[in-house]
Amino acid sequence: MPAPQLYIIEYTLHDEARSFIIRSERMDNTEAWHWASCDAGVGIIPKFGREKIKKVSRPMAERYGVTGVSWRLSGSKPAPAQGERKPDHAAG
């Protein structure tokens, strides 16, 4: 069983940027959309770690105004936004 790690989840709720940190054993896009929905007040947070709940899907989250969900391992650099250039380190 993998050890829990810290993940940063970033999303937009009604055009307002939000982010939070969560400890989880695994993370993927489905999990990130569900937890972003929970942070936005749409999803249900399980009371016990092993409790099975219905996860909020991306289409359902988008109906409530959650968009642009992304996630990364804490300590890693965020991906550049679309249209943003990476700094040119070769210039000197």
Image (cartoon, rainbow, N blue to C red):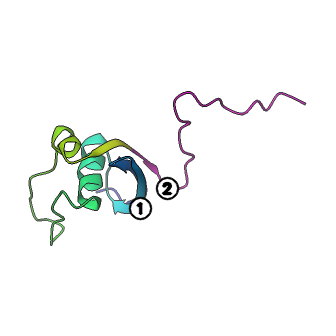
Residue 19 appears in the rendering: yes
Answer whether labels 2 and 1 touch (C-beta < 8 Å). Answer: yes
Between residues 84 and 34, which one lies in front from this camera angle? 84
The quarter of the picture where residue 18 lies is bottom left
Depicted 3 relative to depicted 64: above or below:
below
Q: Residue at x 15, y 62 (%)?
A: 44
Please give the residue where the numbered disc 2 appears in the rendered image. Answer: 74
50 displayed left or right of 21: left
Question: Which amino acid is tagged 2?
Answer: Ser
Query: Which is more toward the observer, 34 or 73?
Result: 34
Where the C terminus falls, by quadrant? Answer: top right
For residue 61, what is the image quadrant? top left
Q: CA distance from mark 2 to mark 1?
A: 8 Å
Q: Is residue 51 magenta?
A: no
Identify the main secondary structure in magenta.
Answer: loop
Residue 76: x and y, percent?
Answer: 55, 49
Q: Residue at x 18, y 65 (%)?
A: 45
Q: Which residue is mark 1?
A: 21
Residue 1: give x, y in percent of width and height.
28, 57
Query: Helix or strand or loop: what does disc 2 sit on?
Result: loop
Q: Going 33% across and 56% down the picture, which residue do you hit? A: 2
Q: What amino acid does circle 1 point to? A: Ile
Residue 9 appears at what percent x and percent y? 39, 52
Residue 4 is at least partly visible in this image:
no
Given residues 84 and 29, the one toward you in this image is 84
In magenta, the rendered stretch is: 70-92
Label 1: how many Cα within 10 Å (few below 14, some 14–19, many 20+): some
Give the residue at x 42% y 56%. Answer: 19
